[in-house]
Image: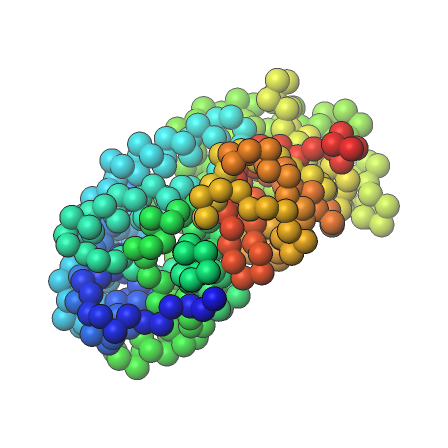
Amino acid sequence: MTTAPASTKKQRIVVGLSGGVDSAVTAYLLQRQGHEVVGIFMKNWEDDDRAADADSSGADPGYCTSNIDFVDAAAVADVLGIEIEHVNFAADYKDRVFAEFVREYQGGRTPNPDILCNAEIKFKAFLDHAMRLGAEKIATGHYARVRHNTATGLYELLKGLDASKDQSYFLHRLNQAQLSKTLFPIGELHKTEVRRIADEIGLPNAKKKDSTGICFIGERPFREFLNRYIAMAPGPIKNPKGQTIGQHVGLSFYTLGQRQGLGIGGLKARGAQKGGGEHAPWFVARKDLDTNTLWVVQGHDHPWLLSYVLSALDASWVAGAAPGSSATLAAKTRYRQADSPCTLDALHDAAFTLRFAQAQWAVTPGQSAVLYDGEVCLGGGVIERTLALEALM
């Protein structure tokens, strides 16, 4: 079972050029292999408030505007001598991704729109558009790899070789049809090598900062942005003793494990965790929608923040079906988290339960639990709730 070598057959490959260095080097590597490369810039969000947010000097407010990114993508296309098309997927994004994003927050959960964007826009709407242009494959600048398993005939999603940049977590909802048409050229490289290549060939964005967070929010305060779509609904903040120690602005504006922005940081700890100190920090531990109560605890390792078991719904499996039980399975319950050994109980292909050997911190409904077998990403599902271990015995 090996990673398929670069195809010697010259193909028409459409690359998603984002304006960043990763997609730029992706296009260059494919061009160097002799493929016919076409660039597409995807506009996924209407910059409806950029003019109002700019200061009086006209300076960029710091948000990742699509106009700036398109200029950078076009400059890359010019250097490489390839065509680039500007395609507006904003309507698709609003219907397929952003609407779900708002619904999840209104339900008190914390969604991950990047995962849904990959499944619904970058590897569905974009893939369909590329195929209409006569593409044989698409490529993006993700740090991941695709392998064809000759023994099973299936395509596998692998972690990127640069562990610090691996993005397989965000790609776990891709299916066999999508993976069969997808290339991730920089998945074999480390970020430092990507930067070196970009600088060596004179790409204009070689030193451009990596984008972080959700692009349509940018550097804006998240609460301010979300309040445009979800009304504030103040309620009590309570500690484990049931004492009201503050007031929240609305449960939608908080996530489990959150430490900043609670407005109670200066209060002394009453009944703090042993060893946590009188001024141990507060963390969001629970959200009770029925009573509109935000429950907070003190100490990073408070029991309310630790879970051994979770249930997940809306599962998506790379192979098309849930994996069988395996002693080597591990999972992440959030990005940039080390894989944690677990056992899988697949109730059916769309739902499953995970039991962890070690407690997981601040497992958050709405986020994704993603399973791995070594370097192979198997798929995952949306965390519905955490369960008391004794409840499943």
Horizontal placement of 148 versus 296: left or right?
left
Judged from this view, the residue extending furthest toward the top is 290
Horizontal placement of 281 versus 169: left or right?
right
Instruction: Please tell me which residue is depicted at 56% across the width and 49% down the height of the picture.
Output: 371
Judged from this view, the residue extending furthest toward the front is 151
Residue 141 x, y percent position in the rendering: 34, 62
The colour scheme applied to this rendered structure is rainbow
Residue 101 x, y percent position in the rendering: 42, 34
* Quadrant holding the C terminus: top right
Front-lying residue, 40 or 260: 40
In the figure, 234 relative to 144: above or below? Answer: above
Instruction: Please tell me which residue is depicted at 32% across the width and 71% down the height of the picture.
Output: 6
Instruction: Count all numbered tags in the image, as a single digit.
Output: 0
In the figure, 163 relative to 64: above or below? Answer: below
Instruction: Please tell me which residue is depicted at 21% across the width and 58% down the height of the picture.
Output: 136
Residue 311 x, y percent position in the rendering: 62, 35
Front-lying residue, 156 or 305: 156
Residue 219 x, y percent position in the rendering: 41, 49
Q: Quadrant of residue 294?
A: top right
Residue 174 visible here: yes
Horizontal placement of 40 versus 299: left or right?
left
Residue 267 visible here: no
Q: Quadrant of residue 209?
A: bottom left
Front-lying residue, 356 or 203: 356
Horizontal placement of 372 versus 360: left or right?
left
Instruction: Please tell me which residue is depicted at 74% across the width and 50% down the height of the picture.
Output: 358
Judged from this view, the residue extending furthest toward the bottom is 200
